[in-house]
């Protein structure tokens, strides 16, 4: 064991980030703007104010300021659970017999069990500052809903969460935690909204999707007095808030003169991956490193690896602005994969642009393969990872095994975004051999692509 590098590294309170890092400021080519679906023009702030808090809109549209100060009130909230540990996986390395050094940034050390609290606290804080009395949101696996419930309870803001129906059935204890924090949780699609009723009319037995839940949450926000919608992934301001993950990891590794060769994150909407890679990707864009960045997604919802880079709606009911992103189509309903946080038809516009420009790679794994990786991690590192995190873990193990064959001493950093203690049904199915893999056929993907709007040719460039 290398005695100069601790197994677990924390940065001090004085080293904690004082600013969020805005990756877009260092992107030579920005991602294309949101498009107003009715008028087919770039969205301006006034288009977004009825849906989002004003400060979040300001951050969403900010493409020039590299560093954005973290308000004192948010920094105080962060002190409850940040900084999070950076851990070297010595036991995993030994089990693999690899010369590679494997590090993971562990974001599961809070009650919500994931990185989502970084943005949830921020969005609830701004809502409180603006006098907003209620918020509406969606959640897949439940990490985002739990995190936002924690934050809203802290700031005394009412919260309605539309939880993807299949996830609410798979993870009932998530619902209990959210309700303990005074949130109202509704399985989606539901009969409580017009968009939900339309979706149920088409398929009464649907398990739902994040696109469906987003539609319901937006409808709730725009039809409720003094209510706003908040989102836990995809959008630029969410990736901005998550940059604290990458900034902390870089500060910790810089202490020992370590620069990763490979950085890996699971990818659904893109929040944790975008946050983890942010400062390092900024360096890559400035020509300061040649790090390999890898996004890992489920084969059941392959937005990057089999999706199209085009303008699409962010929700099933087609109420959001149009975003240029890698997408499977707003009408795509993924199979009931246990990695509920990765069951989104689209991908962050920032990450989509980076992937399209060749700065980011992507891999897709089956559900069985990632749970096999999780079992090895449980045995060697003693943490039960969230199903989402297991995708990044699987890629880290694969690269480490490649190093075993080649003798390369790569340094690998991956994001352990959260814990899987509310996902024990999935682990039970893996243990008894009933965990299944569902990979969409080309025909099933085409049905999703058919829901993508047909825009004028000028939007396809």
Image: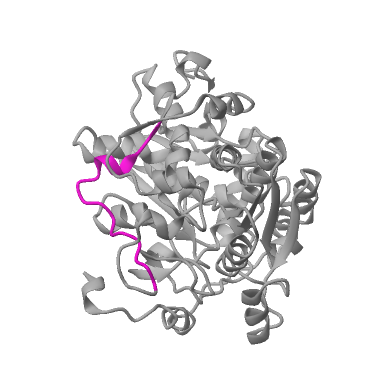
Q: Residue at x 49, y 28 (%)?
A: 71
Lateral position of residue 68 relative to residue 298, left or right:
left
Q: Which residues are magenta?
A: 20-37
Q: Quadrant of residue 334?
A: bottom right
Queried whether the magenta region covers residue 69, the answer comes back as no
Lateral position of residue 145 relative to residue 450, left or right:
right
The image position of residue 91, as x and y in percent, is 57, 30
The image position of residue 246, as x and y in percent, is 43, 34
Q: Is residue 340 visible?
A: yes
| Depicted 247 relative to depicted 414: above or below | above
> For the stretch drawn in magenta, what is the main secondary structure?
loop
Queried whether the magenta region covers residue 35, the answer comes back as yes
> Which quarter of the rendering shows the C terminus?
bottom left
| Depicted 212 relative to depicted 75: above or below | below
Q: How is the image coloured?
A: one colour
Q: Residue at x 25, y 38 (%)?
A: 284
Number of disc labels:
0
The image position of residue 151, as x and y in percent, is 66, 39
Foreground: 438 or 209? 209
Q: Quadrant of residue 223?
A: bottom right
| Depicted 187 relative to depicted 294: above or below | below
Foreground: 34 or 437? 34
| Depicted 8 relative to depicted 277: above or below | above
Q: Residue at x 34, y 66 (%)?
A: 35
Foreground: 346 or 290? 346
Q: Is residue 434 visible?
A: no
The image position of residue 11, as x and y in percent, is 49, 18
Q: Residue at x 43, y 65 (%)?
A: 303
């Amino acid at each position: 064991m290398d005695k100069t590098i601790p197994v677990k590294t924390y940065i001090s309170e004085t080293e904690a980030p004082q600013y969020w890092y805005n990756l877009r400021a260092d992107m030579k080519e920005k991602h294309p703007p949101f498009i107003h679906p009715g008028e087919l023009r770039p969205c301006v702030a006034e288009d977004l104010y009825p849906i989002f808090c004003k400060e979040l809109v300001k951050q969403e549209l900010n493409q020039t300021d590299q560093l954005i100060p973290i308000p004192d009130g948010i920094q105080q909230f962060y002190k409850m659970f940040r900084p999070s540990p950076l851990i070297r996986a010595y036991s995993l390395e030994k089990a693999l017999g690899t010369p590679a050094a494997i590090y993971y940034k562990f974001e599961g050390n809070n009650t919500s069990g994931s990185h989502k609290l970084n943005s949830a606290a921020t969005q609830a804080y701004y809502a409180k500052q603006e006098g907003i009395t209620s918020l509406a949101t969606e959640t897949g696996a439940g990490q985002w809903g739990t995190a936002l419930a924690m934050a809203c309870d802290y700031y005394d803001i009412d919260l309605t969460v539309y939880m993807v129906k299949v996830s609410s059935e798979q993870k009932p204890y998530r619902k209990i935690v959210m309700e303990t924090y005074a949130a109202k949780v509704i399985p989606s699609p539901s009969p409580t909204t017009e968009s939900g009723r339309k979706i149920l009319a088409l398929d009464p037995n649907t398990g739902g999707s994040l696109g469906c839940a987003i539609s319901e949450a937006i409808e709730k926000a725009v039809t409720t007095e003094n209510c706003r919608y908040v989102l836990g992934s995809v959008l630029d301001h969410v990736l901005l808030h998550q940059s604290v993950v990458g900034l902390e990891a870089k500060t910790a590794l810089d202490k020992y003169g370590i620069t990763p060769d490979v950085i890996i994150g699971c990818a659904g909407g893109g929040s944790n991956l975008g946050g983890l890679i942010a400062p390092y990707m900024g360096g890559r864009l400035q020509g300061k490193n040649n790090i390999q960045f890898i996004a890992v997604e489920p084969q059941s919802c392959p937005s990057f690896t089999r999706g199209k880079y085009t303008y699409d709606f962010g929700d099933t009911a087609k109420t959001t602005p149009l975003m240029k992103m890698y997408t499977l189509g707003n009408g795509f309903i993924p199979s009931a994969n246990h990695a509920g946080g990765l069951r989104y038809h689209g991908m962050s516009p920032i990450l989509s642009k980076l992937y399209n420009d060749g700065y980011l790679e992507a891999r897709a794994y089956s559900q069985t393969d990632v749970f096999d990786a999780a079992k090895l991690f449980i045995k060697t590192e003693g943490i039960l990872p969230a199903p989402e995190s297991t995708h990044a873990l699987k890629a880290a193990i694969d690269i480490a095994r490649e190093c075993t064959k080649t003798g390369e001493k790569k340094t690998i950093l991956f994001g352990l975004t959260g814990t899987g203690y509310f996902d024990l049904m999935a682990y039970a199915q893996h243990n008894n051999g009933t965990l299944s893999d569902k990979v969409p056929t080309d025909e099933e993907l085409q049905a999703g692509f058919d829901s993508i709007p047909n825009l004028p040719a000028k939007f396809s460039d």
